[in-house]
Amino acid sequence: MRTAARIDRLPPYLFAEIDRKVAEARGRGADIISFGVGDPDLPTPDHVVEALREAALDPATHRYPSYVGMPELRSAIASFYERRFKVSLDPDNAIQPLVGIKEGIFHLPVAFVDQGQVALIPDPAYPVYETGTLLAGGVPHLVPLREENDFLPDLGSIPKDVLERASVLWLNFPGNPSAATVERVFFEDAVEFCMRHDLLLAHDAAYAEITYDGYVAPSVLEVEGAEECAVEFYSLSKTYNMTGWRIGWVAGAPVAIEAIKRLKTNIDSGIFDAVQRAAIAALEGPQDQLRDTVERYRARRDLLCEGLASMGIEVSPPRGSIYLWVPVPEGHTSESFATFLLEEAAIVVAPGNGYGPSGEGFVRFSLTVSDERLAEGVERLRRVVA
Ligand SMILES: *Cc1c(COP(=O)(O)O)cnc(C)c1O
């Protein structure tokens, strides 16, 4: 048996590798604290679980769901965009529910990147923008996010010949792994750039609700012109602690949504209706648990920043996301520092170079560790890094 060349070219998924290392260390009896994977430790709100329970008891939810999602869910998403961003979206042609946004992100290049065409991808970034492009036969062009530029891409620095072959620009704010945030004016420039160069702007807003210190994340769809050239991916995973449920959506330019719909009808058969009803409950129900979750992350962010500062590692507290993007101490690489922390402190972090070459020199700490274990982690860091 012979695997396809495209599988041989595909790197193992970063977090699958981290999971493997953690399992191995735990197998040796190590008391591991994992800051490695961004998977919320807090539970899904009770009223959402209850909505799923009730819906699952209704045999009407047991059959194939609709390809385009329940009309009630698309309406709830449109109302959410109206309330949250003052953006009007037509539920019938500007919104497509997804089986978690990873699915839609991975598939988007199949619909928009022809063989040999370029996708502009931030570096460092969530790995799926690049792997989706590769499997579609596209060519990733990495746009570095540098610390001196507040981890924003310098769109003006992309070479002209690359732009001529490009069809998609990926953005992600609040950013994973860099935790960078933007104001609306950044999106105004990006939309203008994409119009000028005939690009689809694909924005990943996975962390739009996880923000601190009064900062409110904008949507790219707030910007004039975005309805013609942009789509936004929005996930319930991080907002409502629903990573296991697999539901999110893509919204924006109807031409793009139409292409994604056509692709998806050929791939999956929709999202379990009970999960869709639970998603409606999440969007339309009480939001107090979201506020509590964000407050918990803020307290953890501050604790970890203070702990790192006391070891001489300065990280300014980010305004969004569930991550700290931490420069490694002198003399270390991302990998050597991650290995050092694992061996000396039984602490797992994600090496920055796993998110792209410009991530070298950083590691990512996720704040999805219980308060108690996080405090213990900070103590261990103090002991080994000093
Ligand atoms: C977690 C994450 C996702 C995945 O979201 P799902 O809806 O759970 O698939 C996508 N993008 C970024 C940047 C993420 O951090």
Image: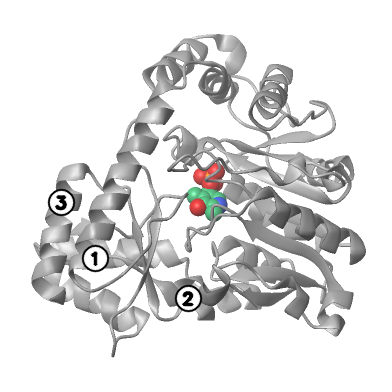
Measured as percent of width and height from the top left, residue 151 is found at 55, 68
Report the residue marked by disc 2. 359
Which badge, 3 or 2, comes first in the chain's sequence?
A: 2
Q: Is mark 3 within 8 Å of ligand 1?
A: no
Give the secondary structure at mark 2. helix
Numbered label attached to residue 141 = none
Q: Nearer the viewer, residue 141 or 267?
A: 141
Q: Is residue 2 among the parts visible in the rendering?
A: no
Measured as percent of width and height from the top left, residue 180 is found at 52, 59
Q: Is residue 46 among the parts visible in the rendering?
A: yes
Quadrant hosting residue 126? bottom right
Report the residue at 72% width, 53% height from top. Answer: 185
Which badge, 1 or 3, comes first in the chain's sequence?
A: 1
Q: Do tag 1 and tag 3 residues touch (Cβ < 8 Å)?
A: no
- Mark closer to the observer (1, 3): 1
Report the residue at 73% width, 35% height from top. Answer: 96
Which badge, 1 or 2, comes first in the chain's sequence?
A: 1
Report the residue marked by disc 1. 308
Position above or below: 93 against 151: above
Residue type for callout 1: Leu
Numbered label attached to residue 375 = 3
Q: Quadrant of the N terminus?
A: bottom right
Give the secondary structure at mark 3. helix
Residue type for callout 3: Ala
- Mark closer to the observer (1, 2): 1
